[in-house]
Structures are given as structure tokens and as C-alpha cells.
Image (tube, rainbow, N blue to C red):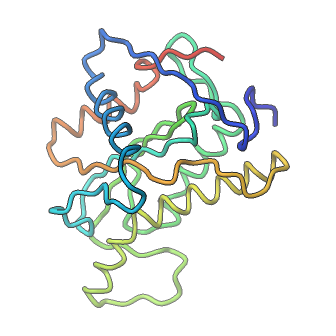
Amino acid sequence: MNPPYNRPCDYTPVVIALNGNNPANRFVHRFIIWENAMNRRRKHSSLRARWHDYSAPGLYHIILTLKERQPYFGYIRDSEMHLNDFGHLVSGHVLQLEERYDGLRLDTFAVMPDHVHLLVEIQDITRESFASNHTKDQAAKGRRRRMLIPLMVGYLKMRTAKEINHLQGTSGCALWQERYYDRIVRIATDIDSVRRYIVHNALHHTRTP
């Protein structure tokens, strides 16, 4: 594999330019505001809404960001995302999430040069498809739902980092930022806006290889 950027341990910051004429930029600005706030918080502070039951079924918008925003998964040219080999590797693992976790539905996703957008649905019954023992106990189901998002995110980050480090001949290099963005999407019109924003995410960024 020959990505046009440095190895995972050699990140350098990259600047994103926004298209000010696109009304969907409010989501880009929300993300930038969140990221700036996140960087000011202490290590163990919570980024989640205290009032929300994260075990509840529903749609969640999740953003995973690469360390130092290094554009490691490809580039944008003429408002189109061009994945490199590592970008395709990540995309393949995202597409396998539904098979790995019952009760998880992948609604929409996009792999960008330095981050990944996921819109996933937690359905009413959730369990890991590879688990050997299943229980009908409602409390146990609630615990599995509660763990699903961090479990899914942790698996995706661990698996992709391990494979990319292996292909690059590195070992133990951090690929992803430790934290991630997750937002509960409740209103139908908001769901459609998030879907459009994810599908057309390349339109909101200007980046050349």
C-alpha cells in the first residue's frame, strides 16, 4: 500500500476550508465547535448528555477523527472523495458492523480523508452475534444496548489501527483520537439533514492530494 501521506506516528495538522454557500455547513460548524470544546476539557470529563438514556433504541450520528487530523484515508478533488487503500480498508470494516452486532443497523456512512461519519440505529434487541450465551433478561438486554456504541467504536478503531500499523510495518502507533463525537438524532427532518450531510460530506471540504 502506498498512501500519499506519512506513517501513523508521523502526523501533521491539516487545515479544512469550508464552503460558506452550503446551508448544511451548520453541521460542520457544530462539529468544529464541539472539537474545540473537547480539547479544552479535562481527560476524564464526560461529553455525553446526562439526561439521555444511551441504552434506548434510536439513531446516533457518530464521528471518528484521526489523530492530528492527518488525511490518511484519501483526498478530495472536485468535491469528490477519493479513497486510498486504507480508506477502502476502513470502509470494509464499517460495512461488516451489522454482521458483527445484532440490533445494530447501519443507516449511512462516509469515510473522509481524516474522519469517518456513521449514522447507526440501535434497535430494540441488541446482542453481539459472536456471543455464545443469550439471555431473555431485560436488564441484560439494556446493559448490552448501553455498551453497544462504545463497543462498536472501540472495535472499529482497534481493528483498523492494528491492520494499518501491520501494513505499514509500525507497531502500537495511535491512529485515532481517543474520544469521538456522538449525537442523538430524534427529529425526522434532522435525520434527513444528517443523511444528506454525510452523503455529500465532500462538498463541505476543500482538500487536494
Q: Nearer the viewer, residue 207 or 125?
A: 207
Q: Is residue 56 above or below residue 30?
A: below
Q: Give the image location of residue 30, x and y in percent.
A: 28, 33
Q: Give the image location of residue 42, x and y in percent.
A: 38, 55
- In the figure, residue 78 lies in which quadrant? top right
Q: Residue at x 81, y 37 (%)?
A: 1
Q: Nearer the viewer, residue 17 or 88?
A: 17
Q: Give the image location of residue 95, x and y in percent.
A: 53, 50
Q: Is residue 58 above or below residue 65?
A: below
Q: Is residue 110 above or below residue 179?
A: above
Q: Give the image location of residue 55, x and y in percent.
A: 26, 69
Q: Residue at x 72, y 44 (%)?
A: 9
Q: Residue at x 53, y 50 (%)?
A: 94
- Indicate the quadrant containing the C terminus: top left, top right, bottom left or bottom right: top right
Q: Nearer the viewer, residue 209 or 170?
A: 170
Q: Residue at x 46, y 19 (%)?
A: 205
Total tally of numbered discs in the picture: 0
Q: Is residue 169 left or right of residue 38?
A: right
Seen as rendered, the residue at the extreme right is 169
